[in-house]
Image: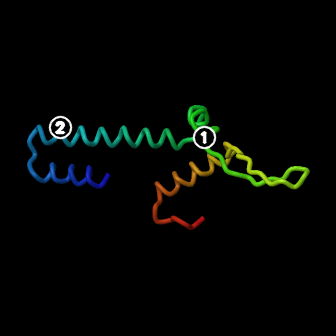
Amino acid sequence: MNSLSEHIRSLAQSSTTPETLIDIAEDVQELEAENARYREALTPSADTKTAFIGEFTFAVERSDSLGSRYSEDQLVPWSTIKEIMGAINRRALNPTSAGDE
């Protein structure tokens, strides 16, 4: 993202022709669309639940009645996925508070 903002700055400083302003406006539109996609992907909803539920697992070690050990994959609960989404959103909105939780 820095390279795009640097590109916009250089366009703005180079000249203020109508073409330059159009280029800047298009770059800003791209950033706004990308931002909207990130926000949608990180906002708990029926759509994101459908997209993410079942995507993440973790291994749990178990033993059977004979003492044999085995590993079993468990799905990460939707409530945990929502908590992670919230933490990412908080970090994105206030990067200086990282690790404060």
Taking the image as shown, residue 59 lies to the left or right of residue 28, namely right
Question: Can you tell which quarter of the image residue 77 is in?
Answer: top right
Q: Residues within 10 Å of mark 1 (few under 14, many from 20)?
A: few
Residue ID at (10%, 46%): 16
Pick out the residue farthest to the right: 65
Residue behind mark 2: 22
**What mark, if any, has residue 39 been given in the picture?**
none
Label 1: element kind: loop
Residue behind mark 1: 55
Number of marks drawn: 2
Label 2: element kind: helix
CA separation in Å, label 1 and label 2:
41 Å
**Of residues 101 and 57, which is closer to you in this image?**
57
Image coordinates of residue 79 in percent, x first then y, are: 68, 45
Image coordinates of residue 5 in percent, x first then y, are: 26, 52
Residue ID at (74%, 52%): 60
* Rendered image coloring scheme: rainbow
Amino acid carrying label 1: it is Glu
Residue ID at (45%, 43%): 38
Q: In the rendered structure, are the residues bearing label 1 and label 2 in contact, judged by CB atoms less than 8 Å apart?
A: no
Question: Can you tell which quarter of the image residue 30 is in?
Answer: top left
Taking the image as shown, residue 34 lies to the left or right of residue 95, namely left
Taking the image as shown, residue 26 lies to the left or right of residue 84, namely left
Image coordinates of residue 47 in percent, x first then y, are: 57, 32
Tell me the quadrant of the picture where the C terminus can be found.
bottom right
Q: Residues within 10 Å of mark 2 (few under 14, many from 20)?
A: few
Residue ID at (63%, 50%): 83
**Of residues 35 and 51, which is closer to you in this image?**
51
Image coordinates of residue 49 in percent, x first then y, are: 61, 36
Q: Earlier in the sequence, mark 1 or mark 2?
A: 2
**Of residues 58 and 25, which is closer to you in this image?**
58
Amino acid carrying label 2: it is Ile
